[in-house]
Amino acid sequence: MSLTRRQVTSAALAALPLGVAAAGTAHAGGRKRTIYIAGDSTAAQKYSDAAPETGWGMALPFFLHADRPVANHAVNGRSSKSFIDEGRLDAILAAVRPGDFLVVQFAHNDEKTTDPTRYTEPWTTYQDYLRQYIAGARAKGARPVLATPVERRRFDADGNAVPTHGEYPAAMRALAEEERVALLDIQALSLALWQELGVEETKTYFNWTGTEQDNTHFNPPGAIAVARLVARELLRARVLGPRDVVRLRDEIPTSWITWPEPLS
């Protein structure tokens, strides 16, 4: 279904959690600074009809102080290109305020060479679209943050976790250096985590069910693990300070993950 830019903006704002919707007022007091997420299905909010599939953006608030609310605009199936073409970046920029953050994670769908509505080439159009997120955030007084794409679950015959994103992570790293943008290297960290966990244990982090073997999307333990990586990187990159992050060493109960009813 094709949506107009006005419909995208309305749906995005209606989907914000109450705590985020109220953040506009809090900005006046200089206390709350919202973390916006632009990304794909690996980060996106999931609903009851998709459970137990879980985006890492659903778990990120567990690791952040209440004064750092999350506005998760990530959507299934989007690339850096299609997210912009559908007006979703415009929806974020309409809401973002000075001092906020925009975390951008794309590549899973940019890689789809047979789909011209989503495909980008790593060293040209992918970087060009990412520059639009950077420029848009900066124009609004917000801080752009690039996050390399979280890795899929893939192992070779010897049990080694192997990368699946080709040149996209390297292209993002180079752009972050060129533009002097903070980089969260989630691709490298998640690949190392899958290597540590191994072939069998990683199945308990991905959306493996009785009817599905999904090596891209997460269940609650996987989403929590990746969100922890994101929070640690936000701290390491000095995007956030020590007082902004919480529970980095704590066990997070999977029962904290909830799936609301689908939006009408």
Image (tube, rainbow, N blue to C red):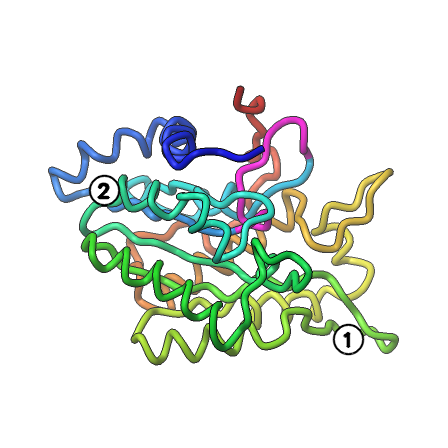
The numbered disc on residue 205 is: none
Main SS, magenta region, reads: loop
Q: Residue at x 86, y 78 (%)?
A: 158
- Assign a secondary structure to mark 2: loop
Relative depth, front residue between 169 and 113: 113
Q: Label 1 neighbourhood size at 10 Å, few (<14), some (14-19), many (20+)?
A: some
Is-magenta flag for residue 48? yes
Q: Residue at x 55, y 25 (%)?
A: 260
Q: Is residue 226 above or below residue 66?
A: below
Q: Is residue 59 visible?
A: no
Tell me where residue 189 sits by quadrant: bottom right
- The Cα atoms of the two marked residues, 2 and 1, are separated by 42 Å
Report the side of 73 relative to 34 (left or right).
right
Residue type beneath disc 2: Lys
Q: Label 2 neighbourhood size at 10 Å, few (<14), some (14-19), many (20+)?
A: many
Q: Is residue 11 visible?
A: yes
Tell me where residue 54 sits by quadrant: top right
Q: Residue at x 23, y 42 (%)?
A: 32
Q: Position of residue 122 (x, y in %)?
A: 53, 73
Q: Is residue 79 above or below residue 156?
A: above
What's the magenta region? 40-51
Residue type beneath disc 1: Asn
Is-magenta flag for residue 72? no
Q: Is residue 63 above or below residue 106?
A: above
In the picture as drawn, the residue positioned furthest to the top comes out as 264
The numbered disc on residue 32 is: 2
Q: Position of residue 130 (x, y in %)?
A: 41, 64
Give the labeled residue for mark 1: 160
Report the number of numbered marks: 2
- Assign a secondary structure to mark 1: loop
